[in-house]
Image (cartoon, grey):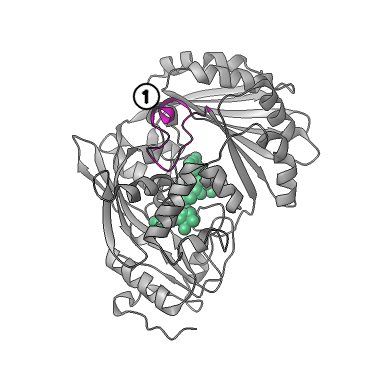
Amino acid sequence: MTSATLPKELDGKVVTPADPRYRLLRSTYTTVARPALVVLPQTTTDVVAALRYARDSGLPIAVRSGGHGLSGRSSNDGGVVIDVSGLNEVRVLDRRTRLVRVGAGARWAEVARDLASAGLAISSGDHGNVGVGGLAIAGGVGWLVRDYGLTIDHVRAAEVVLADGRVVRTDAEHEPDLFWAVRGAGAGVGVVTAFEIEATELRDIAVAQLTLAADPDGSTLSRWAEHLAQAPRRLSTAAMLMSDGRRAVLSLTAVYAGPDTGRMRKAVAPLLEIGTLLDQRAHRVPYSGLVSTAHLHPNLGQQPANTTNGLLPTMTPDAARAITAAVTGPRPALLQLRSVGGAVNDVAADATAYSHRDSDVLVVGTVFPPGDRATLDRIWRPVGAHTRGAYANFESCPDAAAFRRFYPGPTGDRVLATWRHHDPDGIFRSALYPSELS
Ligand SMILES: Cc1cc2nc3c(=O)[nH]c(=O)nc-3n(C[C@H](O)[C@H](O)[C@H](O)COP(=O)(O)OP(=O)(O)OC[C@H]3O[C@@H](n4cnc5c(N)ncnc54)[C@H](O)[C@@H]3O)c2cc1C
């Protein structure tokens, strides 16, 4: 396979195809892969050793936290996967300032569970099996997004193993360029082993689930977006728009960042009238009930899919019509709508590598087999025409053009400069954007 010798400290931490654990570790959420070996570091020193071995062996390197990345690039064929799932500590460093140390390999369900007893939460995403690493290096559009902002907006420091094996703790004062890139474009800087994140005081949240038939002219989506643009920030919503065979149906989850179901009902009331109401429920749950340990699973039984996304500064009538039409055409697609805005847009566009601080709506389009990328592109084109910029974590096929949507203009130039400075040989970015961003 290679003439490089496995370092002593990795004894028992390397999984080859002959190992029974290999079938649980080879693949990602979307993609079946065949790496030469998967290394399971238990410490930052192990990560350094794994990286040195991978570099000496000349094999391609993939870095994995939870394996939920849509592009499948946290595994590879014939290379070394550095799987940091063993670095999964969740520890409150300072209850007064709510500072929490979170290992990159923890799952967000574990973070929610472990912080619940302290009455704390970190807004991450909607799924408990997503890894801390992949989400917290790119954005984090979670259930509390309008109130809390993105996950990266609360990262106060990160520990990174750089391409040359140096371990760096970066924050606003130390290696500020690296810290800027870690928050939005972290996959190209090195292996992030841990984050320090400021959590928020939160125990229970009030949740409403609404199902509505969406008007074909787009007016349901327009009314949804109009309400969210001026609703209390404590209200965030995520919706799935799909066809029931006859019409577009909007399945909407509205989360109120607090336990008060009365206030939640008041904030949600206008949404009951944006389309024909088919079903509604409301309940109060601990935050950890929404980002649940019931989601935890190994990456088996892949769900292949093609996904892309775009951000809308505002939902214009034309955009609302195009989105609604996308799910009712001859080829079925699933569109997801996330309210962003609120606290996300309080942050300056150049403060982190996620620069889209003027958008109110994130639209995500997915096509499942037998639909392929060409099918998705066809369905997405009329929707994409209304979008400006995109979120790196909801793209299954990142290429050089997508890179410029994630990191437009000077942001992209600064991301590339930072990546090249810390990884001159491109060992990390070649795994992310093969041969396109040298
Ligand atoms: C079912 C599902 C639901 C989702 N819901 C949401 C949501 O609500 N909100 C949201 O914002 N996103 C959501 N996502 C997208 C999610 O944020 C990304 O897929 C994220 O990259 C997954 O992180 P991971 O660690 O599990 O992935 P991985 O596959 O392990 O990694 C993804 C990428 O990040 C890189 N990477 C991973 N760990 C590290 C590290 N420690 N250091 C450096 N680079 C690293 C990998 O190399 C890879 O390129 C969802 C995805 C899925 C599949």
Measured as percent of width and height from the top left, residue 307 is found at 62, 46
Report the residue marked by disc 1: 258
The answer to whether residue 276 is left or right of residue 239 is right
Residue 337 visible in the displayed image: yes
Query: Which residue is nearer to you in this view: 394 or 422?
Result: 422
Q: Residues within 10 Å of mark 1 (few under 14, many from 20)?
A: many
**Splitting the image into 4 quarters, where does residue 363 fall?**
top right
Where 312 falls versus 108 (above or below)? above
For disc 1, does the CB lie below 8 Å from ligand 1?
no
Q: Which residues are magenta?
A: 341-360
Where 120 falls versus 34 (above or below)? above
**Splitting the image into 4 quarters, where does residue 83 fall?**
bottom left
The answer to whether residue 102 is left or right of residue 59 is left
Measured as percent of width and height from the top left, residue 164 is found at 34, 67
What kind of element bears circle 1? loop
Report the residue that reaches farthest toward the bottom.
3
Query: Which residue is nearer to you in this view: 435 or 252?
Result: 435
Magenta span contains residue 359: yes
